[in-house]
Amino acid sequence: MDTYNKITQLISRWSEFEHKTGSSDMADFGRWLSCDDEKRITEPAGVSPEADDHMTFYKQMPPARQFLTLLSRGARFLDFYLKKAFEGLEISSRLEFQFLVSIYEMKNPRKTDVIYFNLVELSTGVETLKRMQKNGLVTDFPDPADKRTKRLVLTAKGNEVLSAALKKFQWLDLLVNSFGSDDSWQAFSPSLMWFNDFHNEVYHKHKEKSFEQLMDLILRTKSD
């Protein structure tokens, strides 16, 4: 039965080969089969019809929900490009890069300062910093004014990695060229800055509130 199934598959592939190439040469079929099977193993499947339908679903969302959804997808696209940009460096994520920048810019911050500024959970932030310390990018030292508190500083290696990562942004800045017309992306910056400032305050002052309380707070703020 197994042999019969394989013969059936072979006949099906032969039909596919003739349709795609217009050839009926057995040697050509062997070469095509070898190359096509390799592509099937190494190449991604691509976007399925179901995924295409889902993109249509996004485009039919109410405007407010569409805006928030596209913000979220934009962050995922940025993560994709950053992961590519950081290949070969000692960092592998946007969060690790943001931690490097924060430690450098904040001038010997506390661990909690770095974690809360970057809007991540304490446990996630602590594990990320541990990994960065293990990789020799960051070290800590006692706060001279309070020995119970640790301050963070980049190592020489950490500074080198940060410098290399920042150079990548000379290329990542080109992502704005994907907008429809020159400089059209600049129109978004003021709105996104306001969005960031508003929700940054909500996050840091009211992060322990429930979802319903947060929505009520936002509604009251907008009505004031």
Image (cartoon, grey):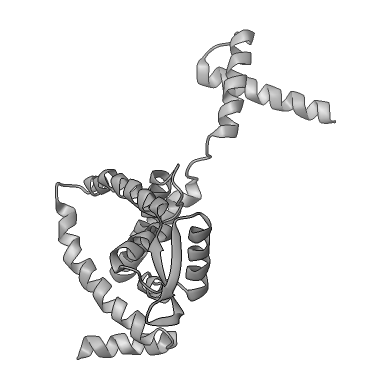
- 193 or 70: nearer the eye? 193
Against 24, residue 146 (above or below) is below
Report the residue at 58% width, 11% height from top. 28
- 190 or 111: nearer the eye? 111
State left or right for residue 107 relative to residue 190: right
**Horizontal and vertical percent position of residue 11:** 69, 22
**Residue 60 in sight in this render:** no
State left or right for residue 121 relative to residue 16: left
Res 154 quadrant in image = bottom left
**Horizontal and vertical percent position of residue 4:** 80, 26
Q: Quadrant of the N terminus?
A: top right
Q: Quadrant of the C terminus?
A: bottom left
Against 169, residue 20 (above or below) is above
**Horizontal and vertical percent position of residue 19:** 54, 21
- 221 or 121: nearer the eye? 121
Report the residue at 38% width, 78% height from top. 144
Report the residue at 44% width, 87% height from top. 210
Against 57, residue 110 (above or below) is below
Residue at the far front: name it: 144
